[in-house]
Amino acid sequence: MKHIVLGLAVLAGLALAQQRPEDVIKGQCEKAEVVAELWHGFTGGAPKTALENLVIEFNKTQGGQVCVRPISQGNYRDLSTKIKAAFTSGKVPAMAQAFENNMALYLESDALVPMSAIGVDLKGVNPLFVNAVTFNKQAYGVPFNKSVQLLYYNRDLLKKHGAKVPLTITEFITTARRISQEEKAPVYFFQPDSSTFSYWFFTLGGSYFQNGSLVLNSPKAVEALELLTQGVRSGWARPITSGFINQNFGAGPFGFSTDTSAGYTFYLQAAKFDLGVATLPGRTDKQPGFSLVQGTNLVVFKRADEREKKVAADFLKFAISPRAQAVFGVAANYVPVNAGSGVEPIVTRYIKENPAFGVAITQARYARFEPALSNWEQIRFDILGQAIREAVLGQATPKAALDKAQKAAEDLLAGRTR
Ligand code: FGO
């Protein structure tokens, strides 16, 4: 364990210098003629440091004339809120992180530069991710920090109860239920949100679209939400309603969670137990469950000045290179988007030392996206997320909550509400 933490620290750049990465970048940008801003939604920890270290490496190759300056705008939702505000009132950055649905929204304002126009080639990038940034046959960004969900588990607790890592949903529920009974407390920690729901929904065979229309209240959706709701009612699932799961280990005995691979460094830091990671429980033991792909892409804005766009193009090419993806992915447990990263020594070495990283790469073969609708962010948080919370907290039945969500989503998509 020690060498892993040390390895992470080195990769996260802590051993780089006494100087904070942010200050290094400040110095790099001091005399630059062109500063290309990159607005992001990392608030701290390994992802933010890994991004900053990547930028430092890039800036070093630019001879001081030009530089990239990453600017945190808060979390992902704060970021898209600020970009929307910048469209109407202020200065847009050269680059930003964006979910696929954010890209759809920005494209409605014709705000994005197609990658072909700035010479950014996505050859060698995982087609699953490339497809997700492609709108009307054009790629409007590059996949950058893409995560998959994994099964996190407490090895000590499993050992104590003589339990195996569950491969199927049935095994998972049986195991979680038994340990919870023996511990007299729920051991499956989950955030009652669209991310957790999507894993259960996709794995049970659900799809958000039927005949081209968004459907939130399908029988599979009801089944997924019932599973979570019943888990809470029968005492094996604990809803975490505030903060990340890794900030809630003190809430009771932690047994399992189904959470983003990018949480790994945060989990490792917070866990006072032996942390294990596995692919998600599947419908059968033949293959893992389907993970939701999260994390973001990098986009370039049309309104940026031409010289900034050139810097942005160079940075994007650098950011998706096998080497950069390997270093970045290893540091923050994101899935390298570039197939070539698989043979980078840093990846192979790290997988050997720490199988958890390899698990994320394997899980990426069983992954799905949420809808890339321009309104999806609002739907996933304020409509579907709200329904999930209501059902899980016992304020409505899963069916009633999802029926209400469906109606609200239809109204929003039809322009009857905002
Ligand atoms: C997060 C969010 C969206 C959308 C999904 C969308 C907007 C979800 C989920 C809502 O990069 P990922 O995999 O993980 C994040 C990374 C960097 O912050 O580290 C994770 N983290 C951070 C701190 C910590 O203590 N623990 C930890 O795990 C963090 O989650 O992205 C996953 C979580 C959420 O933000 O609550 O993606 N998401 N689709 N957000 N705005 N729009 O369409």
Image (tube, rainbow, N blue to C red):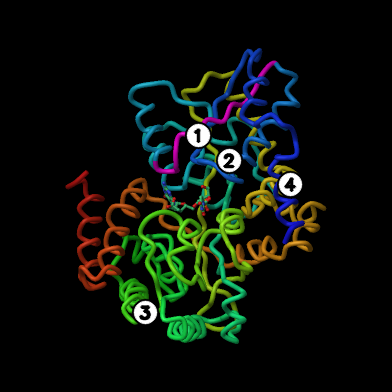
Which of the numbered marks, if any, corresponds to residue 266? none
Q: Nearer the viewer, mark 4 or mark 1?
A: 1
The tag earlier along the polypeptide, 4 or 1, is: 1
Q: Distance between the residues labelled 1 and 2?
A: 8 Å
Kindly identify the amino acid type of the residue bearing the numbered disc 4.
Pro
Which of the numbered marks, if any, corresponds to residue 48? 2
Q: Is mark 2 within 8 Å of ligand 1?
A: yes
Which of the numbered marks, if any, corresponds to residue 72? 1
Q: Distance between the residues labelled 3 and 4?
A: 45 Å
Q: How crowded is mark 4: few (under 14 residues within 10 Å), some or many (20 or more)?
A: many
Look at 37% across and 55% down and name the residue there: 242
Q: How far apart are marks 4 and 1 (CA)?
A: 25 Å
The tag earlier along the polypeptide, 1 or 3, is: 1
Looking at the image, is 201 positioned above or below residue 34?
Answer: below
Disc 4 secondary structure class: helix
Q: Position of residue 300 (x, y in %)?
A: 53, 32
Residue 189 picture quarter: bottom left
- The magenta span reads 65-77
Looking at the image, is 166 positioned above or below residue 41?
Answer: below
Which of the numbered marks, if any, corresponds to residue 322? 4
Depth check, front residue: 253 or 178: 253
* Discs 1, 2 touching: Cβ within 8 Å: yes
